[in-house]
Image: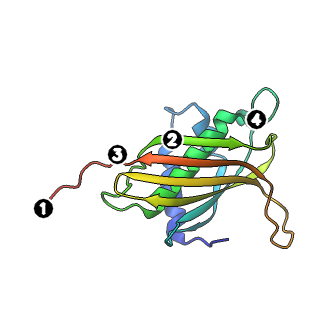
Amino acid sequence: MASKLPEHDEIFKAYTEHFKGDHDRDWSASIISAISLISCSAAPPHPRAVIRLTVQPAHANAFGNLHGGCAATIFDVCTTFVLHVISRPGFWQVGGVSRTLNVTYLRPVPVGTTVDIECEVVNAGQRLSALRAVMRTVEEEEDGKEGVVLAICEHGKYNTDPPLKKL
């Protein structure tokens, strides 16, 4: 697992603060308050982050499992964060907008389950990016055993940064 640097915590805090406020009464607010940054690396070729979340009742469907739409929102929020780790003026500063968000659901995720969302930048060009993520259960420390894969995601984004001012 990649480690994280203090500046990654600062970027994560600024990113999550953006979502907080009275304007946000949807899943995003309950997701943001439930996530924490576990590890992060901006190193090429594939910058990555691991974000942890415990599924709350607000995230559930009528059967007490993570709602599919909420899972898609979790993937959207978490994969977009990794772009902020590599952003710079004129390069993915505002996170862009989603072009595609494909989620494959493999297993139900009951309320109370703690999951890691392992996100990575596959490619980030000037206008388009390709991101992916895996949601897995958090296993007790058992000789590095990975958790069970619950869902996977491919996320395509379009950069909406305003043009840089020329000198």
How many residues crowd mark 1 within 10 Å: few (<14), some (14–19), many (20+)? few
Please tell me in which quadrant of the rendered image residue 61 appears.
top right
x, y percent for residue 2: 63, 72
- What whole-number distance in Å separates the C-alpha atoms at marks 2 and 4? 27 Å
Three-letter residue code for mark 1: Leu
Q: Which residue is mark 1?
A: 167
- What whole-number distance in Å separates the C-alpha atoms at marks 3 and 1? 21 Å
* Residue in view at x 79 percent, y 63 percent: 146
Is residue 31 placed above or below 130 in the rendered structure?
above
Closer to us: 17 or 119 = 119
Three-letter residue code for mark 4: Pro
Three-letter residue code for mark 3: Thr
Three-letter residue code for mark 2: Thr
Circle 2 sits in a helix, a strand or a loop, which is it? strand
- What whole-number distance in Å separates the C-alpha atoms at marks 4 and 3? 34 Å
Nearer the observer, disc 4 or disc 1? 1
Nearer the observer, disc 4 or disc 3? 3
Q: Which residue is mark 2?
A: 100
| Disc number for residue 160 | 3
Quarter holding the C terminus?
bottom left
In this rendering, position of residue 72 left or right of residue 97: right
How many residues crowd mark 2 within 10 Å: few (<14), some (14–19), many (20+)? few
Circle 3 sits in a helix, a strand or a loop, which is it? loop
Q: Earlier in the sequence, mark 2 or mark 4?
A: 4
Please tell me in which quadrant of the rendered image residue 50 appears.
bottom right
x, y percent for residue 37: 62, 60
* Residue in view at x 85 percent, y 73 percent: 143
x, y percent for residue 16: 53, 50
- What whole-number distance in Å separates the C-alpha atoms at marks 1 and 2? 35 Å
- What whole-number distance in Å separates the C-alpha atoms at marks 4 and 1? 52 Å
- What whole-number distance in Å separates the C-alpha atoms at marks 2 and 3? 15 Å
| Disc number for residue 57 | 4
